[in-house]
Amino acid sequence: MTVKIKRAAMSLAVLAVCAASNAGVKLPSVISDGVIFQRQQPVKIWGKAAPGETVAVSLAGKKASAVAGADSCWLATLPPMKPGGPHVLTVNDVSVNDVLIGDLYLCSGQSNMELPVNRVLDFYKDEVAAYANPYIREFKTPKNYTFETEDYEVAPAVWKKAVPGESEKFGALVYFMAKDLYEKNGHVPVGVVNSSWGGSRIEAWLSRDALAAYPERLHRLELAADDAYRGNLSTAERRAQNLWYAIMNRDDPGYHDSLKWNAPTLDDDDWSTTELLGKEWGSSDGKPVNGSHWLRKTVSIPTEHAGEEAELRLGCIVDADSVWVNGTFVGFTAYQYPPRIYRVPAGVLTEGDNLVCVRVVSNGGVPHFVPEKPHKFIFNNGDEVSLEGEWRHKTGCVMPPTPSVTDFFQTPSVLYNGLIAPMRHLPFRGVVWYQGESDVDIRSQYAALMKSLMADWRATFADDALPFYIVELADFLHPSDTYGRRSWQEMRDAQRLAAEETHDAEWIKNGDIGEWNDIHPRDKKTPGTRVSDMIVAHPHR
C-alpha cells in the first residue's frame, strides 16, 4: 500500500523550502526552550544551516553531527536516553535550555481536544490553582494550513508548563491526561504536542498520498489549491458578510433611535414580554427571524451588593451577543459556543432596580438562550441574583440568513501539511485523537477514513506500531432528538470499529458523559483520566 511505504525521506516540496534557508544554524520552533523528547527512542535534532556547514549536536553527554545538504537541511540523531533533566541542548552556537527526556504524545482532533482549561474552571478552578508541575508541558501548534506543500515547521510557539498562569492555556483533556500519567508512570516527565483545530474534519488531517484512495477528496484539494479561485471566493464571501453586518447595523433602530435601546431610561412598556429560555421571540410562523433582537430585564440588587464588582452569566446564546448593564457595555461574544461570562465593574450596579440589556444577533437558526445553563449575577461572596423569568423583547433589524463563508481549513490534506508533516522527525509515545463532531454527516465512511489516518501517520513517523487512543464522542443532543442521537451513536460505533480493526489502537469510552445542551462538555477530567488509564493498561510498547 502506497501509504505504508511513503516518505522515507522528506518530500521534494519540503526540501525546496529548506533550500531557501539563510546561513547559520536554525532549529524548528518545536525544538525550543522547555522541549520534551521521547525517552528510550533515538532523539532526532534537525534544522537548517548553510549548505555544507557541519552541525555539532550535544545533549546530556551524548553527541552527534551532521552536514547541511545542498538544500540547507540537516538531521542529526542522538542515541536513546533515559528520562530526566533538565538538560541543555547545544547545536553549534545555539543553546536550547530546560530540555527534558520523558514521554511525548501527539494530541490531535477538533474543538474538544483544543478546548482550554480556562473554559472548564467552573469545575476545576481550585484544583488548577493549587497544582504546579514543571515536568508536565504542552506545545500548542499555531493554526496554519497549506495546500500544495508539506510545511517544514510550524509557526513559533512556546512550551507551557503545568503551573498556575500557564495551565489555564493547556488543552483541558490534555492537562488532566498528563497529570494522571505523571503520577501513574513514576513521575516520568510528560510532554504533549497539541495539534488540534476546532471544527476540523478528518479528511483535512490526511496526507495527499493517503487521499489517493479517496479521489473525490483529492480533487477537492486540487480545486481549492488554486490561489486565484480561493482569493476570488474569499473576497466575495467577505464582502457579502461585511455587507450583511453593515446593513443590519445601519437599519437597527436600537442603535439609531434618539434613545438607544440599551439606555436605562428607555420606556419599554410597549415591548413584548417573553420567557428568557423560550424560543417564541426568535421565530415567526415557525421560521427563524434572523438579524438583531433586543432583550431587556430589570432586576433588583440587594443593598449589601450595591456598587460591588460582579460576574454576569448568560449561559450560551445562539448566535452572537452584546451586553450592557445600566448602560455600561460589559461584553461581546461573536458565536454561539463559548459560555457568556462577563465581568461587571465595581460601581455599575446600584441598590434596587438595575437594567440588563442583551442584543442578540441571529445568523441562521432560531435565536435563543440555551437552557439548563447559568443565567445570573454572582457576587464575590457567592450570593446570586437570577436573571431567568420574564424579559422584554423587541426585534431590531430583520435580515436573511448570513451569507456563508468557506472554511478552507476543512479542505482535505491541508492540516496534515501545515501541522502534522512538520513534526515528522519527533518520535511520539502515542497519538490521542478526539475528533468526529464535524463528520457525523459522513459517519458511514468514518471508520475507513480513521484507519487510513492511522496508517498514514504511522508512515509519516516511520513507526508502524505507533499507538492510537481514540476518544469516543461525548453525549449530546436533547433526549427528544431521536434522529440526531441515533446519528451520533452511529458515529461512535464507527470510531470503535476503527480501533477494533487496527492493531495497536484503543477506543476510550466517553459517550456516557457530556451535556445534552453543549457540544463542548466541561467535564474533561473524566475522559482525560480514562485516556491515561488506557495508556497505562495498553502501552503497546
Image: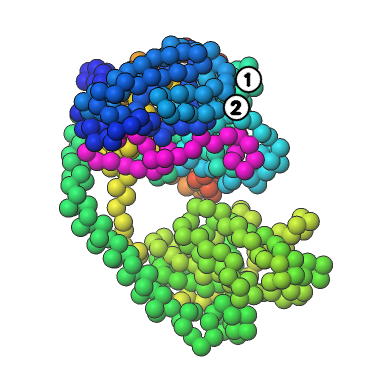
Q: Nearer the viewer, mark 2 or mark 1?
A: 2
Name which quarter of the figure residue 276 lies in. Answer: bottom right
Query: Which stretch appears magenta?
Result: 141-167
Q: How is the image coloured?
A: rainbow
Image point 18% across, 52% down: which residue? 229
**Residue identified by numbered label 2:** 135
Image point 75% across, 70% down: which residue? 307
94 to the left or right of 116: left
Question: Does residue 274 appear in this view?
Answer: no
Q: What kind of residue is marked 1?
A: His
Residue 145 drawn in magenta: yes
Image position of 435 with respect to 344: above or below: above
155 to the left or right of 227: right
Q: What kind of residue is marked 2?
A: Tyr
Image point 29% across, 20% down: which residue? 67
Residue 488 x %, y %:
44, 38
**Residue identified by numbered label 1:** 187
Does the CB distance between marks 2 and 1 fall below 8 Å?
yes
